Image: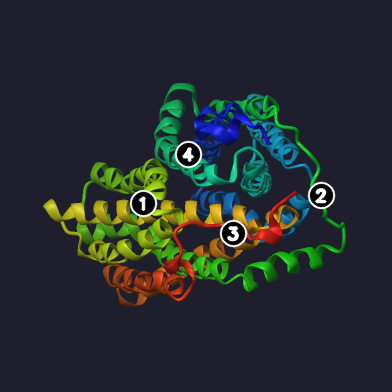
Amino acid sequence: MDPYAMTTGVLRNPDFFRFLGSHVANELGANISRVALPLVAVLALNAGPTEVGLLSALQTTAFLLIGLPAGVWVDRLRRRRVMMVSDLSRFALLASIPVAAELDMLSIELMLTVALLTGVAQVFNDVADQTYLPHLVSGRQLGDGNAKLEVVRSGAFLAGPGVGGALVQLLGASRTLTATALGALASVFFLRSIRVPDEPPAGTEHGPLLRGIREGLTYVRQDPLMRSFAASSAIGNLCVSGVLGLSVLFLAEDVGLAPSLIGALLMSGGIGGLLGGLTGGRLAERYGIARTAWLAVTVSAPFGLLMPLTETGWRAGFFALASMVISWSATLSNVGQITYRQTVTPDHLLGRVNASVRFLTWGAMPLGALLGGLIAQQFGVRQALWVLMVGRLVAFVPLLFSPLPRMRDFAKPPAQVSS
């Protein structure tokens, strides 16, 4: 650990600043590609709804397919090297599309393959970067560092589609993917410049893959607080993903809003996430990171009920307010959860634990989207939003019955302090 990081703010740690630069390049490029990939399929290949839907699904399928094994492999490898190889893979994959377009060799099969493989690379990157942060900053800076990374994620999620649309207009869809590929390459250079040695993980036995996966899941199950965090996030993700899948349909047909206003309202969630990242460090410092994490989820619970009350006129603001508060609370909860895992989990298990939690919480998202669609089909879109937002009210309950309300901050167990 760089001693400079122990005595100064997290942004004054040069290595964390380089790590943050890597995130800016990576997250912005990934969110631009969310727009550019479907546009290439539509504009260059005349893809229909089925192909576009499959392309979008493949970008997020990888976590369900290899999320748990990825945690085992990350625990056995140098974490920074994993991130660099992942970024180089994304660079090569994304760059292949404009090259294929220039050579008149572009096909939907190639694009589907690229979407799936870039998703695989992103899985390894995501697991490795949450596992690597404790090697860059001191324990008391973890919360602030995670909050800064959430600012980047939320800001890229908010700005990425707009930047992507502008680049497509200026450069064309396939050339825009060149820009996203260069973002992945820039991330490699930022990571390469970090001075802290990329040490191989210690204390990890290269045993059977299934045993490694089981160890990560068992650790999560046996930790009462981690188990409660995972249950709360799974409930929230189940309900919110159902709402996200119905939002455009609800605002366009049930409420009857113009497309420009719909776009503005859909951006409100990104603004809330950005505010959560910006306020997370100060709130954690004042009230404690553990207390902030559970209070954010609890206080935000009733705001979701504003969403199905959305109507034309001034009541359109109900959707924006609900989206902002839900995203704000989710960001604060994420900062708390990630910081807790990084604080208490032994280093040789951290990759598996991070992967296990993300598998359990993200696995609820496709189920929520399916559930929302089924309810809307039977009872109507507005009624589905009522069911989903009432369901989200109970997301804070697992936290109330955990040790979290009695905690202010997270402390590393003495037996797990490294020598």
Q: Secondary structure at mark 4?
A: helix
> Which image quadrant: the N terminus?
top right
Look at mark 1 in the image and give the residue it sits on: 328
Q: Earlier in the sequence, mark 3 or mark 4?
A: 4
Residue 298: give x, y in percent of width and height.
Answer: 35, 65
The answer to whether residue 283 is visible is: yes
Q: Give neighbour class at mark 2: few <14, some 14-19, many 20+ (Cα, 10 Å).
A: few
Label 2 to label 4: alpha-carbon separation = 28 Å
Look at mark 3 in the image and give the residue it sits on: 358
Mark closer to the observer (2, 3): 2
| Residue at the (56%, 57%) spot, across then down | 411
Label 2 to label 3: alpha-carbon separation = 23 Å
| Residue at the (70%, 58%) spot, across then down | 416
Q: Is residue 369 left or right of residue 296?
A: right
Residue 413: give x, y in percent of width and height.
Answer: 63, 61
Q: Earlier in the sequence, mark 1 or mark 3?
A: 1
Q: Is residue 393 left or right of residue 65?
A: left
Dot 2 amino acid type = Ala
Look at mark 4 in the image and give the residue it sits on: 148
Residue 144: give x, y in percent of width and height.
Answer: 48, 42
Q: Residue furthest top?
A: 170
Q: Is residue 235 left or right of residue 118?
A: left
Mark closer to the observer (2, 1): 2
Q: Earlier in the sequence, mark 2 or mark 3?
A: 2
Q: Residue 52 versus residue 409: which sits nearer the camera? A: 409
Dot label at residue 202: 2
Label 3 to label 4: alpha-carbon separation = 20 Å
Dot 1 amino acid type = Trp
